[in-house]
């Protein structure tokens, strides 16, 4: 079974019918999107296709890129591209297998050393959870068999998202549960357009990291040889030890499926009948240990201080509790330049904005797991509008970046004031107010989101390439009023005011309400938004007496 020839990728066609295709079919224009039952599978499959196309395309100019965007390649063209790496995508057999450790074998391994196939899924309970009998919500044995198609998807999903898995089990190139950002057309045109929007000219990509002179296939696809051909025993793997394309095909986990003991039955992921469903695999620790400044083109990065070296470095971003919303728009789309909270957008997002100057409407598709060490807390996914940002020049985008930074900072300040007011209304001064207050932040950001995007659309429209200075004061004042209105209404109607009166302390509530209004209407919010602040004349209780001459 070769994954470049097999029809194993689930898609949805324009007529609403679900289908399964081989990778070389992605240029078919009636294929709208991927259609796996699991969102993390769809997230992995789109990265598989982008990585495959970026690794093999000979496209090396913007003119060529535009030609393939306007008229997608035929199946024969894509077959020719992919043929150079065909040997890396064999999924079964006795030799090298896709995403499976070259040196591992399943023959002769004791039954007790195998893992159940369900453990391949990221949300599956870990060994310690099972030993402590704490698998309350996701039970052990919830998936007992996977068809080879879903097993391949599950394996790739684990390798590119791999969290820490105990002693010796390494994380992915971007750590556990990375955040992925892609540019997509709005509305979606086809699966091909989504893939191609996130690929770049060959020379540009090859110059983005790694060592392009390492052309032997195992430097891109590490399962084609022993680990020691790249990473010394007990060592680490840095970008310079691999080909630039390796960034799409990292293999931190040492795994090999047992194809000798398959069963006939229903796949636990897609529900289709399979004549050889996989039920177990063998895993070993000490896989590829990725260190040393990897820069994945599909992920944003933030700057953080290393506690050991005390030096600042760039780390891949990960979804956080509360999901992906407009509070994240700036960091994911344009980056954040604040020295205290510096972010850079994914290099592919930056490349599209800097080099493509695309006409039309586009969105940012962001997704990933919120991980707590080895535990998957939630899968988050969102699409964020770009409006006409892809048509703006550098100066226009800098204007948007600077202005949105003020809006988000103002929203964060207003949200803090709301949370403090609710806490003051519910608890007396000095009382220990334990618990998760994130629901207040979530409500505030959610209610202010429609206003933010309406204003963002106006701002991007104003940030044309002309010399006219945009009129920003009305937008800032409107945003200030919206923040105040939402915060007060949430306090009055849904948070504090919604509680039964007999459980309230009226005086404490009134004081908290008044402080909230005063703080929101004070100078701080205006200062953050660079709005005019009234000058106040300092009064003196005891003016100096007039001295006689």
Image: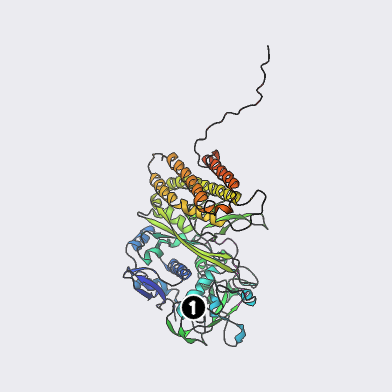
Query: Within 10 angstroms of label 1, few (less than 14), some, or many (20 or more) residues?
Result: many
In this view, 138 is above or below 71? below
Name the spot of residue 414 as percent of width and height, x first.
53, 47
Q: Is residue 291 magenta?
A: yes
| Quarter of the figure with residue 255 | bottom right
Q: How many marks?
A: 1
Whether residue 327 can be seen here: no
Q: Residue at x 42, y 83 (%)?
A: 273
Name the spot of residue 268 as percent of width and height, x first.
48, 79
Quadrant (top left/top right/bottom left/bottom right) for the N terminus: bottom left
Q: Is residue 125 magenta?
A: no
Q: Which residues are magenta?
A: 284-295
In depth, the one of 266 and 7 nearer the eye is 266
In depth, the one of 328 and 255 nearer the eye is 328
Name the spot of residue 458 as percent of width and height, x first.
39, 46
Q: Residue at x 41, y 72 (%)?
A: 82
Quadrant (top left/top right/bottom left/bottom right) for the C terminus: top right
The residue that mark 1 highlights is 151
Query: Which residue extends farthest top?
Result: 549
Tell me the SS state at disc 1: helix
Query: Which residue extends farthest front?
Result: 502
Q: What predominant SS class does the magenta segment belong to?
A: loop
Name the spot of residue 310 as percent of width and height, x first.
66, 54
In this view, 309 is above or below 74? above
Whether residue 258 can be seen here: yes
Q: Is residue 218 left or right of residue 539?
A: left
Q: Residue at x 49, y 84 (%)?
A: 93
């Amino acid at each position: 079974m070769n994954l470049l020839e097999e029809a194993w990728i689930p898609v949805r066609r324009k007529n609403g019918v679900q289908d399964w295709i081989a990778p070389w079919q992605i240029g078919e224009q009636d294929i709208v999107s991927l259609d796996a039952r699991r969102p993390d599978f769809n997230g992995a499959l789109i990265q598989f296709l982008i990585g495959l196309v970026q690794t093999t395309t000979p496209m090396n100019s913007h003119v060529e890129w535009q030609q393939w965007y306007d008229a997608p390649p035929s199946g024969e063209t894509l077959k020719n591209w992919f043929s150079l790496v065909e040997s890396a995508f064999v999924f079964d057999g006795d030799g090298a297998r896709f995403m499976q450790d070259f040196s591992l074998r399943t023959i002769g391994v004791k039954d007790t050393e195998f893992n159940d196939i369900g453990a391949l899924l990221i949300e599956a309970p870990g060994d310690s959870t099972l030993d402590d009998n704490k698998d309350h919500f996701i039970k052990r044995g919830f998936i007992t068999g996977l068809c080879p198609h879903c097993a391949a998807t599950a394996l790739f999903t684990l390798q590119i998202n791999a969290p820490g898995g105990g002693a010796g089990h390494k994380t992915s190139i971007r750590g556990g549960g990375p955040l992925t950002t892609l540019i997509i057309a709005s509305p979606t045109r086809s699966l091909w357009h989504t893939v191609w929007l996130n690929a770049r000219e060959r020379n540009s990509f090859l110059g983005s990291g790694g060592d392009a002179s390492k052309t032997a296939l195992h430097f891109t696809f590490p399962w084609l040889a022993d680990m020691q051909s790249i990473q010394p025993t007990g060592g680490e793997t840095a970008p310079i030890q691999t080909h630039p394309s390796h960034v799409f095909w990292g293999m931190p986990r040492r795994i090999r499926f047992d194809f000798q003991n398959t069963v006939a039955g229903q796949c636990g992921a897609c529900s289709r009948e399979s004549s050889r469903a996989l039920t177990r695999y063998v895993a070993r620790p000490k896989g590829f240990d990725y260190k040393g400044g990897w820069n994945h083109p599909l992920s944003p990065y933030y700057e953080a201080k290393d506690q050991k070296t005390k030096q600042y470095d760039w780390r891949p971003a990960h979804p956080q509790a509360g999901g992906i919303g407009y509070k994240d728009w700036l960091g994911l789309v344009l980056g954040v330049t604040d020295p205290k909270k510096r972010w850079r957008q994914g290099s592919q997002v930056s490349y599209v904005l800097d080099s493509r100057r695309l006409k039309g409407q586009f969105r940012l598709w962001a997704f990933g797991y919120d991980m707590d060490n080895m535990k998957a807390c939630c899968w988050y996914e969102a699409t964020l509008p770009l409006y006409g940002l892809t048509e703006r020049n550098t100066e226009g985008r800098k204007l948007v970046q600077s202005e949105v930074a003020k809006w988000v900072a103002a929203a964060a300040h207003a949200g803090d004031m709301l949370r403090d007011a609710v806490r003051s209304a519910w608890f007396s001064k000095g009382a220990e107010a334990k618990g998760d207050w994130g629901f207040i932040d979530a409500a505030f950001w959610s209610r202010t989101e429609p206003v933010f995007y309406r204003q963002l659309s106006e701002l991007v429209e104003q940030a044309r390439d002309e010399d006219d200075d945009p009129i920003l004061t009305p937008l800032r004042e409107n945003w200030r009023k919206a923040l105040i209105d939402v915060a007060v209404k949430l306090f009055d109607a849904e948070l504090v005011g919604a509680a039964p009166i007999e459980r309230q302390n009226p005086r404490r509530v009134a004081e908290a309400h008044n402080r909230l209004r005063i703080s929101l209407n004070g100078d701080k919010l205006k200062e953050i938004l660079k709005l005019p602040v009234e000058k106040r004349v300092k009064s003196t209780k005891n003016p100096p007496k007039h001295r006689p001459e």
